[in-house]
Amino acid sequence: MLTTLAPFHPRFVHFPIALCLVGALFITLGLIRRRERWVGYGQISLLLGWLGVMAAVITGLIDQSRAPDEVAIRALINQHITAGIALLIAVGLALYWPLRNKRLFSEGRARWGFLALLLVIVALVAVEGWLGGKLVYQFGVGVR
Ligand code: HEM
Protein backbone atom coordinates (compact mmCIF):
# COMPACT_ATOMS: atom_id res chain seq x y z
CA MET A 1 0.00 0.00 0.00
CA LEU A 2 2.69 2.50 1.08
CA THR A 3 4.90 1.66 -1.90
CA THR A 4 2.04 2.29 -4.36
CA LEU A 5 1.72 5.82 -2.88
CA ALA A 6 5.45 6.52 -3.38
CA PRO A 7 6.98 8.91 -4.24
CA PHE A 8 5.36 10.81 -1.33
CA HIS A 9 7.21 14.10 -1.63
CA PRO A 10 5.60 15.45 -4.86
CA ARG A 11 2.18 15.11 -3.18
CA PHE A 12 3.29 17.48 -0.39
CA VAL A 13 5.27 20.23 -2.14
CA HIS A 14 2.56 22.29 -3.85
CA PHE A 15 0.65 23.51 -0.78
CA PRO A 16 3.67 24.94 1.09
CA ILE A 17 4.87 26.67 -2.08
CA ALA A 18 1.46 28.30 -2.64
CA LEU A 19 0.80 29.08 1.04
CA CYS A 20 4.22 30.69 1.65
CA LEU A 21 3.92 32.85 -1.49
CA VAL A 22 0.33 33.90 -0.74
CA GLY A 23 1.30 34.60 2.89
CA ALA A 24 4.25 36.78 1.87
CA LEU A 25 2.08 38.64 -0.66
CA PHE A 26 -0.76 39.35 1.80
CA ILE A 27 1.59 40.54 4.55
CA THR A 28 3.50 42.77 2.11
CA LEU A 29 0.31 44.33 0.74
CA GLY A 30 -1.12 44.66 4.27
CA LEU A 31 1.98 46.48 5.49
CA ILE A 32 2.20 48.77 2.47
CA ARG A 33 -1.53 49.61 2.44
CA ARG A 34 -1.75 49.52 6.27
CA ARG A 35 -4.49 46.87 6.40
CA GLU A 36 -4.08 44.90 9.62
CA ARG A 37 -6.52 42.22 8.51
CA TRP A 38 -4.51 41.40 5.39
CA VAL A 39 -1.41 40.99 7.55
CA GLY A 40 -3.42 38.59 9.76
CA TYR A 41 -4.56 36.52 6.76
CA GLY A 42 -0.97 36.44 5.52
CA GLN A 43 0.29 35.20 8.88
CA ILE A 44 -2.27 32.37 8.90
CA SER A 45 -1.20 31.42 5.39
CA LEU A 46 2.48 31.49 6.43
CA LEU A 47 1.75 29.30 9.47
CA LEU A 48 0.01 26.70 7.28
CA GLY A 49 2.87 27.07 4.79
CA TRP A 50 5.42 26.38 7.54
CA LEU A 51 3.56 23.18 8.52
CA GLY A 52 3.54 22.27 4.82
CA VAL A 53 7.30 22.89 4.49
CA MET A 54 7.79 20.60 7.50
CA ALA A 55 5.75 17.85 5.76
CA ALA A 56 7.72 18.44 2.52
CA VAL A 57 11.04 18.13 4.37
CA ILE A 58 9.98 14.87 6.07
CA THR A 59 8.64 13.27 2.87
CA GLY A 60 11.66 14.55 0.91
CA LEU A 61 14.04 12.90 3.36
CA ILE A 62 12.08 9.64 2.97
CA ASP A 63 12.08 9.82 -0.86
CA GLN A 64 15.76 10.74 -1.21
CA SER A 65 16.79 7.29 0.01
CA ARG A 66 15.44 5.89 -3.28
CA ALA A 67 17.36 8.38 -5.46
CA PRO A 68 20.25 6.95 -7.57
CA ASP A 69 23.63 7.12 -5.84
CA GLU A 70 25.30 9.37 -8.43
CA VAL A 71 27.57 12.28 -7.53
CA ALA A 72 25.65 14.91 -9.56
CA ILE A 73 22.29 13.81 -8.13
CA ARG A 74 23.58 13.69 -4.55
CA ALA A 75 25.09 17.19 -4.93
CA LEU A 76 21.77 18.52 -6.22
CA ILE A 77 19.83 16.84 -3.40
CA ASN A 78 22.22 18.40 -0.87
CA GLN A 79 21.59 21.88 -2.34
CA HIS A 80 17.84 21.12 -2.29
CA ILE A 81 18.05 20.07 1.38
CA THR A 82 20.04 23.21 2.30
CA ALA A 83 17.47 25.49 0.63
CA GLY A 84 14.61 23.48 2.24
CA ILE A 85 16.03 23.81 5.75
CA ALA A 86 16.79 27.53 5.13
CA LEU A 87 13.15 27.97 4.06
CA LEU A 88 11.92 26.21 7.21
CA ILE A 89 14.04 28.54 9.37
CA ALA A 90 13.13 31.71 7.44
CA VAL A 91 9.37 31.05 7.62
CA GLY A 92 9.72 30.10 11.30
CA LEU A 93 11.51 33.41 11.93
CA ALA A 94 8.76 35.33 10.07
CA LEU A 95 6.21 33.71 12.42
CA TYR A 96 8.25 34.23 15.58
CA TRP A 97 9.48 37.81 15.02
CA PRO A 98 6.05 39.52 15.31
CA LEU A 99 5.44 37.57 18.55
CA ARG A 100 8.70 38.90 20.02
CA ASN A 101 8.22 42.48 18.85
CA LYS A 102 4.61 43.63 19.12
CA ARG A 103 5.42 46.95 17.42
CA LEU A 104 7.24 45.32 14.51
CA PHE A 105 4.66 46.31 11.90
CA SER A 106 4.56 49.96 12.97
CA GLU A 107 8.30 50.60 13.45
CA GLY A 108 9.88 51.90 10.24
CA ARG A 109 13.24 50.08 10.26
CA ALA A 110 11.97 46.82 11.70
CA ARG A 111 9.13 46.79 9.17
CA TRP A 112 11.60 47.06 6.28
CA GLY A 113 13.65 44.28 7.85
CA PHE A 114 10.55 42.11 7.97
CA LEU A 115 9.74 42.89 4.32
CA ALA A 116 13.32 41.89 3.41
CA LEU A 117 12.77 38.58 5.24
CA LEU A 118 9.60 38.00 3.18
CA LEU A 119 11.65 38.62 0.03
CA VAL A 120 14.18 36.00 1.19
CA ILE A 121 11.29 33.54 1.70
CA VAL A 122 10.00 34.14 -1.85
CA ALA A 123 13.53 33.66 -3.24
CA LEU A 124 14.02 30.43 -1.25
CA VAL A 125 10.67 29.05 -2.46
CA ALA A 126 11.72 29.79 -6.06
CA VAL A 127 15.17 28.17 -5.63
CA GLU A 128 13.69 25.14 -3.83
CA GLY A 129 11.06 24.53 -6.54
CA TRP A 130 13.66 24.99 -9.29
CA LEU A 131 16.12 22.52 -7.70
CA GLY A 132 13.28 20.00 -7.10
CA GLY A 133 12.17 20.37 -10.71
CA LYS A 134 15.76 19.79 -11.88
CA LEU A 135 15.92 16.57 -9.84
CA VAL A 136 12.79 15.22 -11.50
CA TYR A 137 12.93 16.61 -15.05
CA GLN A 138 16.71 16.61 -15.65
CA PHE A 139 17.76 13.53 -13.68
CA GLY A 140 14.48 11.60 -13.56
CA VAL A 141 14.62 11.17 -9.76
CA GLY A 142 11.39 9.58 -8.54
CA VAL A 143 10.10 8.88 -12.04
CA ARG A 144 12.63 6.50 -13.58
C1 HEM B 1 14.80 19.33 2.91
C2 HEM B 1 14.47 18.10 2.59
C3 HEM B 1 14.06 17.71 1.18
C4 HEM B 1 14.52 16.63 0.50
C5 HEM B 1 15.49 15.57 1.01
C6 HEM B 1 13.88 16.64 -0.81
C7 HEM B 1 14.09 15.68 -1.80
C8 HEM B 1 13.49 15.68 -3.06
C9 HEM B 1 13.59 14.60 -4.02
C10 HEM B 1 14.37 13.29 -3.80
C11 HEM B 1 12.88 14.96 -5.11
C12 HEM B 1 12.67 14.15 -6.40
C13 HEM B 1 11.25 13.57 -6.42
C14 HEM B 1 11.07 12.47 -5.42
O1 HEM B 1 11.80 11.46 -5.46
O2 HEM B 1 10.20 12.63 -4.55
C15 HEM B 1 12.33 16.30 -4.86
C16 HEM B 1 11.55 17.01 -5.72
C17 HEM B 1 10.93 18.22 -5.42
N1 HEM B 1 10.99 18.89 -4.23
FE1 HEM B 1 12.01 18.35 -2.59
N2 HEM B 1 13.07 17.74 -0.89
C18 HEM B 1 13.13 18.43 0.30
C19 HEM B 1 12.41 19.58 0.63
C20 HEM B 1 11.56 20.27 -0.22
C21 HEM B 1 10.79 21.42 0.14
C22 HEM B 1 10.78 22.07 1.52
C23 HEM B 1 10.10 21.81 -0.99
C24 HEM B 1 9.16 22.97 -1.19
C25 HEM B 1 8.47 23.53 -0.25
C26 HEM B 1 10.45 20.89 -2.05
C27 HEM B 1 10.00 20.98 -3.35
C28 HEM B 1 10.24 20.05 -4.33
C29 HEM B 1 9.66 20.12 -5.68
C30 HEM B 1 8.76 21.24 -6.23
C31 HEM B 1 10.09 18.98 -6.35
C32 HEM B 1 9.73 18.58 -7.79
C33 HEM B 1 8.48 17.71 -7.71
C34 HEM B 1 7.87 17.39 -9.06
O3 HEM B 1 8.07 18.14 -10.01
O4 HEM B 1 7.16 16.38 -9.12
N3 HEM B 1 11.32 19.97 -1.55
N4 HEM B 1 12.71 16.69 -3.58
Image: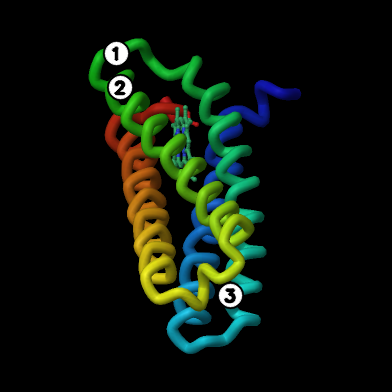
The reply to whether dot 1 and dot 3 touch (C-beta < 8 Å) is: no
Q: Decide: is 131 above or below 116.
A: above
Q: Amino acid type of disc 2?
A: Ile
Determine whether the residue tagged by mark 1 lies in a helix, strand or loop. Answer: loop
Are there few (<14), some (14-19), or many (20+) residues within 10 Å of tag 2?
Answer: some
Determine whether the residue tagged by mark 3 lies in a helix, strand or loop. Answer: helix
| The one of 82 and 32 positioned closer to us in this rendering | 32
Residue displayed at 59% across by 52% down: 96
Q: Find residue 134 and report its horizontal and vertical position in percent.
A: 31, 38
Residue displayed at 58% across by 75% down: 39
* Left or right of 78 on screen, residue 64: right
Quarter of the image for residue 2 reads top right
* C-alpha span from label 2 to label 1: 5 Å
Are there few (<14), some (14-19), or many (20+) residues within 10 Å of tag 1?
Answer: few
Residue 1 in sight: yes
The reply to whether dot 2 and dot 1 touch (C-beta < 8 Å) is: yes
Q: Which residue is mark 3?
A: 39
Q: Find residue 64 and report its horizontal and vertical position in percent.
A: 47, 21
Dot placed on the residue nearer the N-terminal end, 3 or 2? 3
Q: Which residue is mark 1?
A: 70
* Left or right of 10 on screen, residue 78: left
Residue 15 in sight: no
Residue displayed at 32% across by 19% down: 74
**Mark seen at residue 73:** 2
* C-alpha span from label 3 to label 2: 39 Å
Q: Amino acid type of disc 1?
A: Glu
**Mark seen at residue 41:** none
